[in-house]
Structures are given as C-alpha cells and as structure tokens.
Image (cartoon, rainbow, N blue to C red):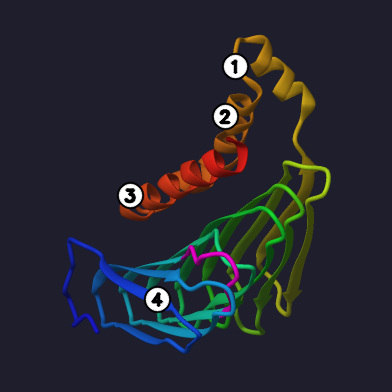
Amino acid sequence: RVPAGVTLAEPIRLRLVASTLTLPRVLIIGAERSSFEVLEGHVGGGQGARVLSVSEIFVAENANVRYGLVQRWEAGVVGHVTARAKVAAGGRFQMSLASFGGATYKADVGALLAGEGAEAETYGVAMGGDLQHFDHHTEHLHLAPKTHSNLDFKVALTHAARSAYTGMIRIAPGAGGSEAYQENRNLLLSADARAESIPELEILTDDVRCSHGATVAPLDPEQLFYLESRGLARLQAMRVIVYGFLGQTLARLPQSTRERIEAMVAERLHTEHS
C-alpha cells in the first residue's frame, strides 16, 4: 500500500518463484495522488510445476500506478495468472506484459474504469518457441464517462509454438465520451507456428470512439532478402525484423520495465536462432 500523495522513485519488485504447486496472492493499493511502479516477476519452476496466481490493483482518485507482469518460467511449468485493476476518477493505470517461459500459460488481465476520466493502458509482448502454448485474454471495461483505454500487444512465435489472444472492450450505458483502442499483431517465424486473434467490442452507448486491429502474418521474405542483400547473415536479419516488430510496443513501457524486457527478448532470440 502506497499512502496518499506519496511518489516512489524506485519500483517495488516482487519475485514469485514457481514450485510443485504455487498459489501467489498479490494486493496493490495506490491511495489518492500516489505515483509508483510495481514489477511482478514470475520465475523458476520446472517439469510438473503448477502456478495459480491472482493480483488485484486498486488505483484511487488521481493516482498513477504502473504495473509490470513478467513471466519467464523454466520449461515445463503450467500456469494461470490473473491481474485486474480498478481505476477511480482521474486515476491512471499502465500495465506491461511480458510472456516468455513455461509450457502452457494463460494470462487473464484487464482494467475496470470505474470513475470519470479514468485511464488504462496495456502494452505487452510474448515470444514463444518449441511446443509452448500461450493464451492471453484482456479486458478494458468502461463504466464511467470520458474514460480512455489503449492496448498494444505483440506476439512472435517460432518452431511449433501456439498463441491465442482474445480482447474485450466494453463501453457500458452511461459511459459516453469514452475512447478505446485495441491492437494485436502476431509474427510467425516458422511454418509450424500458429496464432489466433479474436478482438471483441461491446458498445452499449452513443458518443464513443472505439476501434481495433488484428493481424497474423509470416516473416516477410522481401524484408529478409533486403537485409541479407545488405550483408547481414540470415539469423541477424531475423533478429532485426523481430526487434523492429516489437520496438514500438517496447518504447511505450517505463524505462525500468523496458530494459528488463529488452534483455529477455535479446536472450530469447539468441537461444532460438543460434
């Protein structure tokens, strides 16, 4: 709990280690006009490990809370992580997602915009390989007028990895003047990788601005050819393309979160394509 009016210069770091059965429960409360960042990192585990995690975040009036959810379990972990925020009037919430590890991973995240002028942003990246299976579900629920939400989620897959994404934007009756945007883009780095994207809009009032975008596409051979013709080896060229694909999303993250995720992207690309 961060008291009213308090600003923290450094992020609060949580390290949650997976074991045979792990049931973490996290509660984060940002009081009025507080400003801080929380980084929740899920690590460890191994074959047979199971994780069921729940995190709740409460953002009071005019508070500014930044929350990073980074999952980098070892191979073999099966896990389900839920993270939901409730944002009061004038509050601002930013969620950063990074999904890298485990065998089967379900993430159910979102924000409830409960007060007038509340804002929520969700930015994330996922990188899967081998036989990994990712399933991400996001929700931005607008209950109050003049609320704003934005989502940008990128997925890159190689080998026989699978990804499913569903994203719900709901504008409730009486939430006029609200704006929402959702974007999910998937890059397939191998012929066996598969991705599904299902954006959902439920708009129950007038005077709103809502839109969404979703793509699933293989690696562009012309981009690859261009970079190779400029002297880059094939693996180097693939890394440049992936960095470019993820770069815009990563640039939107808080610096401390971005640096950690960029390092993991570099490590994953080196492992997958070395």
In the figure, residue 90 lies in which quadrant? bottom left
Q: Are marks 4 and 3 in contact (CB under 8 Å)?
A: no
Give, as a three-letter code, the residue at label 2. Answer: Val
Q: What residue do we see at 62% from left, 83% from top?
A: 174
Q: Which tag is nearer the camera, tag 2 or tag 1?
A: 1
Question: As displayed, is residue 131 above or below residue 2?
Answer: above
Whole-number angstrom distance, CA of label 3 to CA of label 2: 21 Å
Q: Quadrant of the N terminus?
A: bottom left
- The residue type indicated by label 4 comes to Val
**Residue marked by disc 3:** 255
Q: Are marks 2 and 4 in contact (CB under 8 Å)?
A: no
Residue 29 lies, in percent from the top left, at 31, 84
- What kind of residue is marked 1? Leu
Separation of residues labelled 1 and 4 (CA atoms): 39 Å
Q: Earlier in the sequence, mark 2 or mark 1?
A: 1
Label 1, secondary structure: give it: loop
Q: Earlier in the sequence, mark 4 or mark 3?
A: 4
Hey, which residue is sitting farthest front in the picture? Answer: 47
Q: Which residues are magenta?
A: 71-80
Q: Is residue 73 magenta?
A: yes
Rendered residue at 58%/33% (across/down)? 239
Residue 40 lies left or right of residue 211; in this view the side is left
For label 4, the residue is 17
Q: Residue 186, percent across and down?
A: 71, 50
Expressed as whole percent of the image width and height from the top left, the position of residue 89 reads: 40, 79
Query: In terms of sequence position, does the residue under pointer 3 or pointer 2 come before the other?
Result: 2
Q: Nearer the viewer, mark 1 or mark 3?
A: 1
Q: Magenta part mainly helix, strand or loop?
A: loop
Front one among 170 and 234: 234
